[in-house]
Image (cartoon, rainbow, N blue to C red):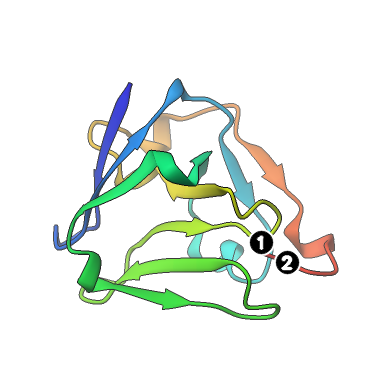
Amino acid sequence: MIGHGTCHCGAVAFEVELENGLGDLKRCNCSLCRRKGAIMAFAPVERLRIVKGAQMLTLYQWNTRVAKHYFCKICGIYTHHQRRSNPAQVGFNVACLEGTDPLALTDIGLVDGASQSLQD
């Protein structure tokens, strides 16, 4: 299954190959994620492709500066990030996917980033 996603203003578009649908949904309670409030799913880094607006993404890094968090420069929406705990994997904002209602999603797990000594 291929998921198609965009930021709010449409300047950034991505595709993500989903082997098992959305699979294991997560929220994180680290200082960044609890503020952005996104529900995330994960995929191998090579399975997420920016198909429009790569130049419109801005990068935010903090703490160890290993994780790479990407946001649209125009509307500020978080689209995806490359993880510190597993750099071969990306987390992406499920609410950016076409046809997905994040308020209808259930069974969302927690990544306890607040308790990790080195957070994503």
- Mark 1 neighbour density, 10 Å: few (under 14) some (14–19) many (20 or more): some
Q: Which quadrant is the C terminus positioned in?
A: bottom right
Q: Which residue is mark 2?
A: 119
Amino acid under label 1? Arg
Distance in Å between CA atoms under marks 1 and 2? 7 Å
Residue 69 picture location, percent across and down? 48, 67
User: Does residue 20 lie above or below 10 as drawn?
Assistant: above
Secondary element under disc 2, as helix, strand or loop, is: loop
Q: Position of residue 40 (x, y in %)?
A: 51, 45
Query: Under tag 1, what secondary structure?
Result: loop
| Residue contact at pointers 1 and 2, CB within 8 angstroms | yes
Residue for point 41% across, 27% down? 18
As drawn, the label of residue 84 is: 1
In the rendered view, would you say 14 is above or below 76? above
Q: Residue at x 45, y 21 (%)?
A: 19
Of badges 1 and 2, the one in the foreground is 1
